[in-house]
Image: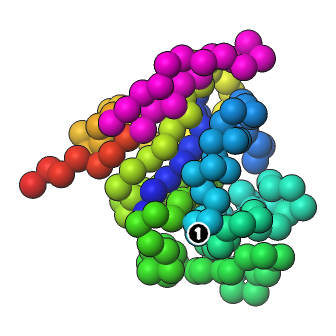
Amino acid sequence: MQAIVNVTENWAIGRDNRLLFPLRADLKRFKELTMGHAVVMGRKTLESLPGRKGLPGRRNLVLTHDESFTAPNVETVHTPLQAVFATGAEDFCIGGESVYRLLLPACDRVYVTKVLATAEADAFFPDLDADPQWRIESESEIMEENGVRFQYVDYVRVDLD
């Protein structure tokens, strides 16, 4: 499994169930990378999407404790293990915070859009720069959109054997 996330310099990802810095280029990259794959998300992330329904062109899995939860274009799973068994190496964890924390141990790659700014937040992604289990595989040039500077940083899990 892989993860994809938009973070700030202090690894913040959201506030009030919204992205801190929605960037057109980042959303385009997200769509290109995830199209045709399964995406695993939490219920709150699903509810933040347009129409509160699964993303088109993808198999949408919602990880929720609510066994009666249903939504258009989604399948539900109720444990991280079910999510892992329902997906493959090319599929994606797309958030939010608690789902990232539960599924990051099953991920071998993380596609990060790093916004070179900070903002008040109530949701965070684990700091991969401070975690010896992760290393940067590639970094893009710094880009700018509507005055917001950002870059793509791809991380891969380090074999610590």
Q: Is residue 144 visible?
A: yes
Q: Position of residue 131 (x, y in %)?
A: 30, 39
Query: Is 31 on the left-hand or right-hand side of 155?
Result: right
Q: Is residue 29 or residue 129 the one in the foreground?
A: 29
From which residue to which does the magenta span run? 137-154
Q: Magenta span has 138?
A: yes
In which quadrant of the rendered view does residue 22 lie? top right
Q: Which residue is drawn at 33% across and 45% down?
A: 156
Image quadrant containing the C terminus: bottom left
In which quadrant of the rendered view does residue 121 lie? top right
Q: Residue furthest right?
A: 51
Q: Is residue 125 or residue 35 the one in the foreground?
A: 35
Give the prevailing secondary structure in the magenta stretch: strand
Q: Can residue 131 be seen in this view?
A: no
Q: Which residue is drawn at 77% across and 65% down?
A: 56
Q: Name the residue under label 1.
A: 38
Q: Where is residue 155 in the image (x, y as percent from the top left)?
A: 37, 41
Q: How crowded is mark 1: few (under 14 residues within 10 Å), some or many (20 or more)?
A: many
- Residue 133 sits above or below residue 2 on the image: above
Image quadrant containing the N terminus: bottom left
Q: Which residue lies furthest to the top in this view?
A: 147
Q: Residue at x 66, y 80 (%)?
A: 76
Q: What amino acid is found at the position of numbered circle 1 in the picture?
A: Ala
Q: Magenta span has 144?
A: yes
Q: Position of residue 122 (x, y in %)?
A: 66, 39
